[in-house]
Amino acid sequence: MGLATLAQVLRPIEERFPPQDYPELLVGLERSDDAAVYRVSDELALIQTLDFFPPVVDDPYLYGQIAAANAMSDVYAMGGEVKLALNIAAFPEDLDPELLAEILRGGADKVHEAGGVIAGGHTLFDEEPKYGLSVMGFVHPAAIIRKGGAQPGDALLLTKPLGTGILMTAAMQQLEGAGAALDAAVESMRRLNRHGAHLARAAEARAMTDITGFGLLGHAAEMAAQSDATLVVDAAALPELPQARHFAGAGALTGGGGRNVEQLAGRVQLPDGVDDETHALLFDPQTSGGLLISVPAHGADSLCAAIAEKEGGCWRIGEVEAGSPAVRVR
């Protein structure tokens, strides 16, 4: 669902639950963030989130892993640890039970890797398979990392390369070579953001979010708005999945990317002459994408190196400047 539509449909809920009536709700709808956070005590807050979607790859086990990693990512984006998860699943009545078991096994293995536990869930019949998780995590109330908080002079880091939407579209269109190119995207999507979040928290990151359906520029625009600052993104520094640029040029563009372009008009500034492939990558919806981290510049390089050593990659893609809340690409 696009940014504008989402804001519209959430308005009645915001009106029904005014934040001043719920002081223990530390993060709710009044300022869009990656997950809800509820304070239980001075030492403990609960993070709650959920996410699910139809298959993005043919292999049921890998689909389960990707869906679980994607759902848990919002807990990590808030600086927390995954503790408990529930399955959310919808399957056709005639689906082979072995396929269903493989999807659930993939999700279970990822939750186990995260140090959490799956304790149940809910399944219903539907024409198209869908799978994901409702996830609960823990965080100290003073250690929450929000989307807002980026300050002028901060460096911007990105922990995964871009292009998952483009490569999945190319595979669905059965473009030549797309199957092999999708392998790198799968490895990226099934990788947890857990260690990157740990390291960012230890480095006292000021703001953090994960890159998913609104693309890099959409999520950067949210960070800019909540930080009341301008985020400057260096297009030449953006990491790309292998062959993502090639397939963008071949026309493997997503409907979500087009909606992102429309709904971010006026919130992002692009340089004259930006090529079509770079444009596509900037707006491409990501599945289980990386973390966008705003961190004091003096610690950015060491943090980036530590994340790269632990997770295989991290890139410094820009900085934060004083100015109106917007994203400027150079």
Image (tube, rainbow, N blue to C red):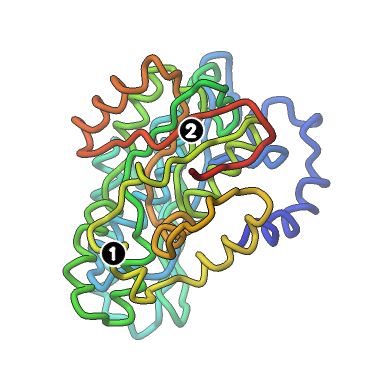
**Is residue 272 rendered to the left or right of residue 29?**
left
Badge 2 local density, few (<14 within 10 Å), some, or many (20+)?
many
Hey, which quadrant is residue 164 in on the image? bottom left
Q: Amino acid at mark 2?
A: Met
Q: Residue furthest front?
A: 273
Q: Is 96 situated above or below 223?
A: below
> x, y (%) of residue 11?
78, 52
Q: Nearer the viewer, residue 282 or 5?
A: 282
Q: Amino acid at mark 1?
A: Ile
SS label for mark 1: helix
Q: Nearer the viewer, residue 80 or 127?
A: 80
> x, y (%) of residue 26?
64, 28
Residue mark closest to the camera, 2 vs 1: 2
Mark identifier at residue 103: 1
Mark identifier at residue 208: 2
Q: Is 171 situated above or below 83?
A: below
> x, y (%) of residue 194?
32, 35
Q: Residue furthest bottom?
A: 94
Indicate the quadrant containing the N terminus: top left, top right, bottom left or bottom right: bottom right
**Is residue 224 rendered to the left or right of residue 180?**
right
The residue under the point 30% across, 43% down is 192
